[in-house]
Structure formats: structure tokens, C-alpha cells
């Protein structure tokens, strides 16, 4: 469903972030993208989310050319994805519950749906008892679980997790990975970037390895291979 | 759909207003300073124009007629003067009234009273008192009075003298001063308004700068530009309304105090009376300025962080 075709991104200072990258991801897959910092993982995801334009090449999702979308349509397009970031990106002025509810509000969901689905999402990540805490009152692992709950509450087709475990200790890392696996088992496509060997080893799914803007390896049931 | 969004945006605006305490207070205070400046400028403008009006009102010219001037000619002249656009008011004082007033003014002066009783007949002629709408217009009225139009049918003039010619210098200077005071007042108003607007816009921009990451996150979660803007605009409206109300509350006791201090000095206009009788207009001016200023600055400031 997601196709990157000969994607190249050269930044104005002539840094080559992506070089001729072609990759396709099927519905329901769990893909880990690994590589050193600067290998192009994040740039690839930014292209997918239409946060940045490629220098050349094409990204298409369900036969929609992402970079031909009008800017008024981009926010609707982004609702196909639930995103999780290394630095959580929760809204500091909203409680855990409101952070999750906000994602539903912007998607124009009804109040009944919100009051039904948000508790479910909180339960899935095991934080029902901290619904009314503000992000500053939560630990790093808890924040990331709230961020995951927010990402999946709209039942997106794809969950994008950009280094979700980068700021977490090993126990929280494993919890986050388990939650992502659970979401994938429920049928959602998951794209995960990481440079943590333990993460890919425990996922035991497809691993795409990137090196200086190119795809170096693509292993089914792969292990971290650098 | 629209109503759901509107309600959510409004609610978020209210919640953020309370939760972002310090930021809210900072922009509220700055907005209050701005509105206070605007309010004071409006009030002092009113005081100034009433003061200038009073001074202008004291300027007039008198036309003294010869004692033998026929009544019909004087009346004809009064009519002609009243018809002129620059004339505000023409008052007729008969020769008898002029004498009574003259006696009353000099009742303590035995010499004058004594010499008046020596003469049998009234040495004074009738008087027309002319007030122009603006002091600068006395020149043209005076010119009109020296034209042929006011000459008696017999040929000779019925006018003894016009006191404009003696007061010309004073009147000219006064109208120049009034003109200048008005220009300076306008200049100060414009200058202060610009300063106030610049400071407010920048404060609100800073307040929203602190929320730039939030704005980015909202966009990433899939919010449309207007959905992100909405709460900030609502906060802007609340800021404007609250600031206008608070400034009105502060202005009232202030005008009472200033009014009681300056009542004698300004004579006519009491600032607190003016404040009370123009309460609604003044409130609407402040409300409009406050809301428009903060809404526009919020709108523009958020726009800078929407390009994700």
C-alpha cells in the first residue's frame, strides 16, 4: 500500500539524505527501519507524512501521489497515520485523556465516540489510572504509552514510530515494543525506526537497513545487521 | 460538524485561557496598558476640544454703530450677517441697553458717571456682537463689514468702528495657537496609538511563540490550520473583552479624581461627567480596539508556526 519510488532528497546545503530509495510496504506488515543516525530513516518518514518534499522521486499511498496533494488536503491525509516520536510530542497543556481525545476531536469524531474510545485506548496501553495527569506528571515510558494511545485511537491504517524507544530504559522499551506488536496483530501496519538491536531482535519481523541514504539490506524475519 | 468544531474550539480557548496563567496575564496586562492609553487619549482629547471651544467662544467682535444709524439698516445688517455661513451668532444690543451696561460696568467710577449725566443724550450707539464659528473667520467677517454692502443708502457708513481691528493681533495669535494645539494633540494620539499597537502585537507574538511546538504537534496529529488557530483567536477575544472591562473599571475612579482636581481650572467640562455620559461609546471603542488588536495579532502570530 505504501510505495517509495526512486526517492532522492538533497538539502539546500547539498547534504544527500536519501539516494534513489525504492521500498514498498504491504498492508498489515511490521517493518523495522534501522540504521545509524543520519542514515535517512527520519527523512524517509518525513516524506511519507508530507512534512517535506523530495528532490525527485515519488511517494504514493493507496495510489495517491502524496506530494501532489493540495495543502488543504494534507491534514486529512495525515489522519491515515498515527505517529509516535522519540520525544513524545504530547501537548503539555492537556491531560493524558485530553491529549488522546484531541486527536479524535481534530478528526471530527463525535463526543460519544470520544468518550467510548479514549478509555479503551488508555486501557490498551495500561494507563487508565493516569488519565487525568498532565504530561509533566508522567514518566518517560508512560508519556510514550500515552503517545501510542493517541496514535492508535483513530484506528489509523499505519502506525509510524520514529525511534519510540530512544529515550526509554530497557524495561519501558520492551513494554513499548510489546504494545506495538499487539497493535500489529490487530491488523495495523507498523513502521518502526530504531537503532536498538534488542528491539528488532524481539520483534522478529522484516528489517530494512539503511546506510548513508540508501537501502543496504531488506530481510524478512531479519535481525539487526550492521 | 461545524457546530461541533466551533464548540470544541471555543472550549479549548477557554481552557487554555485559564491554564496558561502567566502568559495570559502578561498579554492581558499589555493589552490593558494599550487600552488605557487609548481611553486616556479619547478623554484628554475631549477635555482639550472643550477647553479650546471655550477659548474660541470668548473671542468675538463688536460692531459699534453711529448714534444716528437707522434701526432698519442695523436690522438689515444683522440679517445679512446671520446669513453668512461662517457666522455662528449675532446679538443685537440697543443704544439704551449699551448705556445701562456701560453705567453698570463703571458704577464705582464717579468721574464717568458724573460726566455721563452732564450730557443729556445717549452718547453710545447700538452694538452688534458677532461670534464666528472659528476664530480664523473673523478676518473675512471684518472684510465684509467694510464693503459697500453695509453702507447706508444715504452714502455714509452707519458703522462707527469695529473692534476687530484693535484685537486683530490677539485673535490671529489665538487661532494659530489653537490650530497648533490641535495638530500636536492629533500627532501625540497617532504616535501613542502606534506604540501601543506595536507593543501589543509583539507581546502576543511572544505568547504564541511559547506555544509553537504545540502548534506543530497539533498539525502532526492532523488538525487543520483553522482548527489550530481557533482557540488562539478565542483567547484573543477573551483577552480583549476582559482588558476593556478592567480598563473601564480603572478609568472611572481616575476620572472622578482628575475631575475634582481640575474642575476649577477647566471651567466647563468635568472629566468624570464626560466619562459617565459617554460610558457606552467609550466602552465600545475600547472593546473594539482590544478585540480587533488581539485577534489580529493572534491570527497572524499563529500563522507563522502553521507551516509544518
Image (spheres, coloured by chain):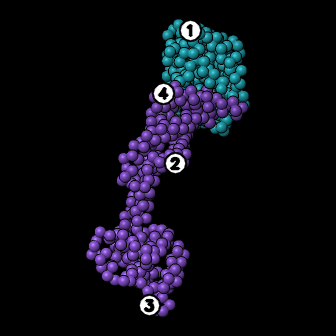
Q: Secondary structure at mark 3?
A: loop
Q: Secondary structure at mark 2?
A: helix
List the residue tagged with mark 3.
B156
Q: Earlier in the sequence, mark 2 or mark 3?
A: 3
Q: Position of residue A78 (x, y in %)?
A: 65, 29
**Front-most of B270 and A125?**
B270
Which one is in front in this view, the residue at disc 2 or the one at disc 4? 2
Can residue A8 be seen in this snapshot? no
Q: What colour has chain B?
A: purple
Which one is in front in this view, the residue at disc 1 or the one at disc 3? 3
Q: Position of residue B34 (x, y in %)?
A: 45, 43
Q: Is residue B194 depicted above or below B230 in this figure?
A: below
Residues under labels 2 and 1: Cα distance?
Answer: 72 Å
Apparent side of residue A44 relative to residue B52 in the rendered image (left or right): right
Q: Secondary structure at mark 1?
A: helix
Residues under labels 4 and 1: Cα distance?
Answer: 38 Å
Chain in cyan, by letter, is: A
List the residue tagged with mark 4.
B21
Q: Residues within 10 Å of mark 3 (few under 14, many from 20)?
A: few
Amino acid at each position: 500500500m505504501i510505495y517509495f519510488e526512486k526517492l532522492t532528497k538533497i538539502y539546500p546545503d547539498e547534504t544527500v539524505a536519501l539516494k534513489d530509495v525504492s521500498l514498498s510496504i504491504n498492508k498489515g506488515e511490521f517493518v523495522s527501519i534501522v540504521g545509524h543516525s543520519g542514515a535517512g530513516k527520519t527523512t524517509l518518514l518525513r516524506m511519507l507524512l508530507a512534512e517535506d518534499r523530495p528532490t525527485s522521486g515519488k511517494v504514493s499511498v493507496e495510489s495517491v501521489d502524496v506530494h501532489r496533494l493540495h495543502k488543504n488536503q494534507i491534514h486529512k491525509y495525515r489522519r491515515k497515520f498515527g505517529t509516535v516520536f522519540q520525544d513524545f510530542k504530547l501537548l503539555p497543556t492537556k491531560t493524558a485523556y485530553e491529549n488522546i481525545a484531541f486527536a479524535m476531536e481534530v478528526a471530527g469524531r463525535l463526543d460519544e465516540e470520544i468518550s467510548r474510545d479514549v478509555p479503551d485506548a488508555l486501557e490498551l496501553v495500561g494507563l487508565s489510572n493516569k488519565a487525568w495527569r498532565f504530561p509533566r506528571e508522567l514518566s518517560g515510558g508512560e508519556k510514550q504509552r500515552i503517545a501510542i494511545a493517541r496514535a492508535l485511537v483513530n484506528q489509523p491504517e499505519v502506525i509510524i514510530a520514529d525511534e519510540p524507544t530512544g529515550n526509554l530504559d530497557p524495561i519501558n522499551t520492551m513494554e513499548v515494543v510489546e504494545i506495538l506488536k499487539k497493535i500489529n496483530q490487530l491488523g495495523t501496519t507498523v513502521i518502526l525506526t530504531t537503532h536498538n538491536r534488542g528491539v528488532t531482535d524481539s520483534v522478529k519481523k522484516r528489517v530494512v537497513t539503511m546506510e548513508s541514504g540508501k537501502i543496504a539490506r531488506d530481510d524478512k524475519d531479519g535481525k539487526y545487521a550492521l | 460538524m461545524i457546530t461541533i468544531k466551533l464548540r470544541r474550539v471555543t472550549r479549548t480557548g477557554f481552557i487554555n485561557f485559564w491554564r496558561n496563567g502567566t502568559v495570559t496575564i502578561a498579554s492581558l496586562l499589555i493589552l490593558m496598558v494599550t487600552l488605557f492609553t487609548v481611553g486616556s487619549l479619547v478623554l484628554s482629547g475631549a477635555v482639550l476640544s472643550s477647553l479650546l471651544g471655550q477659548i474660541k467662544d470668548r473671542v468675538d467682535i463688536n460692531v459699534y454703530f453711529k448714534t444716528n444709524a437707522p434701526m432698519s439698516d442695523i436690522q438689515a445688517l444683522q440679517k445679512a450677517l446671520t446669513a453668512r455661513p461662517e457666522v455662528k451668532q449675532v446679538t443685537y444690543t440697543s443704544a439704551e441697553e449699551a448705556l445701562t451696561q456701560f453705567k453698570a460696568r463703571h458704577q464705582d467710577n464717579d468721574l464717568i458717571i458724573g460726566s455721563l449725566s452732564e450730557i443729556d443724550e445717549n452718547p453710545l450707539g447700538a452694538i452688534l456682537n458677532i461670534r464666528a464659528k472659528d476664530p480664523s473667520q473673523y478676518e473675512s467677517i471684518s472684510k465684509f463689514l467694510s464693503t459697500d454692502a453695509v453702507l447706508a443708502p444715504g452714502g455714509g457708513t452707519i458703522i462707527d468702528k469695529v473692534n476687530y481691528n484693535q484685537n486683530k493681533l490677539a485673535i490671529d495669535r489665538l487661532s494659530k495657537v489653537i490650530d497648533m494645539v490641535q495638530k500636536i494633540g492629533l500627532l501625540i494620539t497617532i504616535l501613542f496609538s502606534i506604540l501601543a499597537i506595536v507593543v501589543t502585537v509583539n507581546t502576543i507574538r511572544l505568547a504564541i511563540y511559547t506555544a509553537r511546538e504545540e502548534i506543530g504537534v497539533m498539525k502532526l496529529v492532523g488538525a487543520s490550520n483553522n482548527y489550530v488557530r481557533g482557540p488562539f483567536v478565542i483567547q484573543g477575544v477573551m483577552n480583549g473583552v476582559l482588558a476593556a472591562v478592567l480598563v473601564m473599571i480603572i478609568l472611572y475612579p481616575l476620572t472622578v479624581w482628575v475631575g475634582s482636581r481640575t474642575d476649577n481650572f477647566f471651567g466647563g467640562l468635568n472629566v468624570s461627567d464626560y466619562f459617565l455620559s459617554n460610558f457606552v461609546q467609550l466602552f465600545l471603542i475600547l472593546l473594539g480596539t482590544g478585540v480587533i488588536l488581539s485577534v489580529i495579532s493572534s491570527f497572524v502570530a499563529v500563522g507563522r508556526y502553521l507551516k509544518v
